[in-house]
Amino acid sequence: MAAYTTHPAQPSTDKRWKLVDAAMRRTGKSPRSLIETLHTVQEAFGYIDEEALRYVAMSLRVPLSRAYGVATFYHFFTLKPAGRHTCVICLGTACYIKGSRQLLEAVEKDLRVAPGETTADGEISLLTARCLGSCGLAPAVVYDQEVAGKVDANSLRKRLHDWNEQARSRHDA
Amino acid sequence: MTPDELEQIAEKERAAQSECATELRVCVAAGCLSCQSDKVKDALDAEIRQRGIGGCRVKGVGCMGLCAEGPLVSTSKGKMYKLVQPSDAGAVLDTFDPGTQDKILPAHLHCPTDTPFFQSQQKIVLENSGIIDPERIEEYIARDGYSALMKALTEMTPQEVIAEITASGLRGRGGAGYPTGLKWSTVAKAAGAKKFVICNADEGDPGAFMDRSVLESDPHRVLEGMLIAACAVGAQEGYIYVRAEYPLAIKRLRTAIRQAERLGLLGANICGTRFSLHLDLRLGAGAFVCGEETALIASIEGQRGTPRARPPYPAISGLMGGPTLINNVETYANVAPILRKGGAWYAGIGTEKSKGTKVFALAGRVKNTGLVEVPMGITLRRMVFEIGGGIPEGRQFKAVQTGGPSGGCLPEAALDMPIEYESLAKAGSIMGSGGMIVMDESSCMVDVARYFMDFCMTESCGKCVPCRVGTYQMHRILTAITNMTATPKDLAMLEELCDLVKHTSLCGLGQSAPNPVISTLKSFAAEYKAHIEEHRCPAGVCGIDAEGDKA
């Protein structure tokens, strides 16, 4: 392991590390800003890998074990890259009452993945949410950041089908 | 900024508004926005420009309440349109374009506002929601915004502010209902060089979206409440802990903070006085337990959000060891009107022990899903059948769930009970933060109990054994019941576990985790019995094939 320093070298020449550095500088590299910094990393890279975790921990003078503890404690952080598309099914109470579990079971069966997993071709990640706060529109699903309300199995299947078609045409091209 | 300067901004804004004969307000809060209300707004804008209608403008506003019928559009003259699509822009404008005024509005766009849904509400927290543009501080000021802060700073002592809040009878709107005035005076009296105010906007209950709507529709209202609180308790630093899952609320809060700082209403030496407050946002990262105040503080400090034993309460030793005032979004949103109109006015609304109004997020199997603000003491029956419009598709009402995973399911027999902290607790539920989910005969109450237990099991932080292991065991038994493999012995074990987890857990999450089970066991015992003894699910939800929830 590299010598312990509060000024570790950026893991790569990727420009996104500058965003992370800027976020840490704003808080004076305070160990208290660990969660804020992890948010920035995830926003920039889409997920938090071990390299990023080491870099942040060292820069903020936080033990790696604590950084790992925090990153895995909070559901919002993910340590694995997401697929090209994400499909988040809300399992909040209102959505659950209106059948979001059946939606989830349908997708699980169609894509052959469990929640939190990505299809083998790296195309679609299936995720679940505790509550999106769009309860008036239950059941709600988020397709690539875009919230859709009053979703049924047909519209959900159609969207997944469209994504797969797109992937196929990309392959053929 | 002086009171006169504030009044000047308000006058200027009001004058600008009076020049415009008709204002079209399009809801751009999260609910309607996910139905493309931003495109509706653009379409209306384009249509007005194309027709060249004078004295007419379009603006984005916050939540109007009836989220199920979005996108909603209303006018400054009181008309309301529902389910508006971008292609309907012409039809909406026809109704007040002088040239085409005689044209009849297509029926599906007409949204009557003389219905109980709108008429039974009393708006204090939401008084600006759906009326002002949440991204402009001037509009907030034009509706008496920040005048309560001025009053607190120039005409009142901190003790008088606290006395006014105490007189109002306001209680914490996060769910527990602790008297707000008492909390404020504890923090004010606590010894400590540096004190903090925190706004708990980590709205974690599934099925609750009140705080989100308040933050998206009227963010300055929350800032003003925090400023008054900080001034009363002597805090110089504050944090708003908001869910990262609410990007729009975060964006609007950031804008609001920037605007208030620019006008000298936030920052150093506010309004030329010695009072300073620096506010910052902290983003939650998806941990339900962080709604518990000591866990929330740990999270703001950049650590895992695990609660600690109380006392000492945060009011004595909280963030970085300093006395810390933590209130919920809705609690802060009530502060400014109380100071403006007096504690006695507020205490005149509601019931003897529960004063004022409460915002509820009405969802589930009910016609009018959305956001409502009603005076305390209204009955659950009125909430479900008058305001909510009853159960759709001619089905039968079965239960109403309040308080999220910490609350309980109330049956038909409890419907005539008034909504107040004590009566809900007595009936086996809690007020909670305001989520209200209606269920009909298609919901299996054992499955609902299992659903909430799954939630608590996953969200348990793992620090104390009763919660970490107890929720797992209860979930295992409930899953067995829904799979028709449980025995009467399991049921006895479940009841014992409920008692154990309730009384020995460290924080509110564990202490209240058995509530959904206890309340359904009490009111819907027959359903449990049918699963265990007859191996059937009366609602037809559970089957032998039904697997446990994998999420």
Image: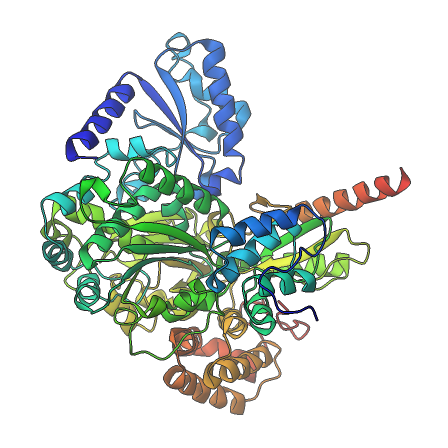
Front residue (pair B490, B41): B41
Describe the colour scheme in one phrase.
rainbow
Front residue (pair A120, B74): A120
Q: Residue at x 22, y 50 (%)?
A: B228
Q: Residue at x 17, y 44 (%)?
A: B273
The spot of residue B487 in percent (x, y) is 56, 88
Q: Residue at x 16, y 59 (%)?
A: B169
Q: Is residue B92 left or right of residue B159?
A: right
The spot of residue B418 in percent (x, y) is 24, 61
Front residue (pair B85, A26): A26
Count every numbered label the image shows and give the total.
0
Q: Quadrant of the C terminus of chain B?
A: bottom right
Image vertical order of residue B483 relative to residue B32, above or below: below
Q: Is residue B468 visible?
A: yes
Front residue (pair B361, B520): B361
The spot of residue B101 in percent (x, y) is 38, 13
Q: Residue furthest right?
A: A172
Q: Is residue B523 visible?
A: no
Residue B518 picture quarter: bottom left
Q: Quadrant of the N terminus of chain B?
A: top left
Q: Is residue B40 left or right of residue A127?
A: left
Image vertical order of residue A30 relative to residue B133, above or below: below
The spot of residue B123 in percent (x, y) is 26, 44
Residue B323 picture quarter: bottom left
Q: Residue furthest bottom?
A: B489
